[in-house]
Image (cartoon, helix red, strand yellow):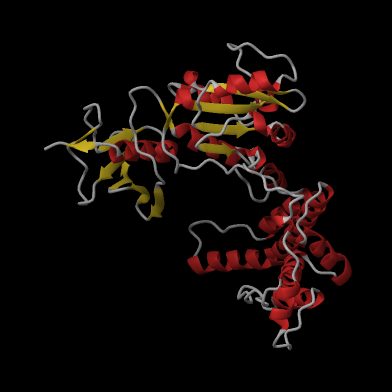
Amino acid sequence: MTDSFDPADAGCWMAHGRPAHQAHALADAWRRFPDLPNDAPLDERMARARERVQALRPLNEAIRLETERQRTAANFACIECQIAQGSTDSRNPAILHARDVHGYGWDAAVAYADGKYAAVAGWPARPPSPSRAEQQDVRPPAYQQGFLDGGGQPDDIFDVARRSFAATPSEIDRPDNPRVARPLPSQWPSPTDMPAPVSWQRRLLLLGASEREAGTIGILAMLRERPGHEAAALFVVDAETGLHPPSGLPAPPPGDDAALRQILRQGDYTDILIVADHAELARLDADADILPLARTMERTRNSVLQQRAQFRLWLARGRAPDEQFAAGHIRWSKMAAGLSGRLGDFTARYAGPASPRGHRIVVEDASGDLARGYRTPVGQELHPEIVIGNKAHTRTAMADLLRQYAASLRLG
């Protein structure tokens, strides 16, 4: 990553993630149509920018088409993987059938599968509404084709009744396929800021062995920054050997699920989080009966950046001894004056730079005035204006203030 970005240098574009062929095309356009000096007439500078945009138009269209091809290939590959893993969703084979037989792309194939599923299930036809973003939306005709292939006859007034009577029960209702009484760990939702705060001694973190060794996400470093985290239980998940208790607890013999289940039951956990890769999650799914049931059960997912953001939400709900703060979802908005957030009757907003340095954050109550006279449940006075040194920490500081104020009392 370069400190100064030169758009006429293909290396700068590649350092920011562009493929080589795109980087050279972008750099060539900037070399042929560079920005004019700031003292040049405005109309000449705007004309130069329009010339560069026009030169880049074919490249942008090629990038759009390439991105669409990658998205389509990845989505079809995901469907093939689900079928190979034994998925029973009848729409998955229909999606591949639409691609192989009718030559549909991804969006049209999904619409075809929805239409066929509706026909087989005995539902009336409900094709998707045409998209205004595309001149010719391929989804409605693909849905109609799938509806016809599934046995639908729109011209027959008794079509829906006939298909509803002939529809077979769903596979999930068959006695030989019992419903799962609890979701598997891989199906747990991502962390949010909605659940209530929980004391650290009632929190359980299941950390993948790969993350503990490599630290790709930085879970342990982020965890050690939170006061009171030592009271939380941390179990390690190995894709081969399964769960391992913390070093302070006796390790049960390999394969002794009863002993491991007993160790987990002793914790009386309210909040469980899993940070693991696909292989480690698959092992947890196989050993799901060992895990205790808790009020909140979550797991991180998707990219490294998203998992870090999700883990920060989970960390923020941890309550250290003698610490009181409010839960709930903070509603964020980006106004012209800067970032603002709202929780309950309180609004925190960025109030501009401080003198001589730093950045001001203020908290207002329902009246619109500074929230003065509020105290924490233990009697500590809260100040409606603070100064932070790093503007990148604005969101975190505002969230902490809002949660303190939402749990505060006003005396007098």
Picture quadrant where residue 221 is located: top right
For the point 11% across and 38% down, which residue is it? 412
Spot the residue most to the front: 175
Instruction: Give the percent coordinates (x, y) of residue 157.
Output: 69, 88
Picture quadrant where residue 26 is located: bottom right
Q: Nearer the viewer, residue 192 or 12?
A: 192
Q: Nearer the viewer, residue 152 or 11?
A: 152
Spot the residue most to the left: 412
| In-image side of 101 versus 110 (left or right) | right
For the point 79% across and 63% down, which residue is it? 95
259 relative to 403, above or below: above
Instruction: Give the percent coordinates (x, y) of residue 204.
Output: 54, 27
Count of numbered circles on the image: 0
Q: Is residue 409 visible?
A: yes
For the point 56% across and 34% down, which residue is it? 293
Spot the residue most to the right: 101
| In-image side of 287 versus 82 (left or right) | left
50 relative to 285, above or below: below
290 relative to 155, above or below: above
Instruction: Give the percent coordinates (x, y) of residue 178.
Output: 71, 48
Q: Is residue 244 visible?
A: no
Instruction: Give the percent coordinates (x, y) of residue 322.
Output: 33, 23
- Quarter of the N terminus within the rendering: top right
Picture quadrant where residue 48 is located: bottom right
For the point 81% across and 69% down, which residue is it? 104
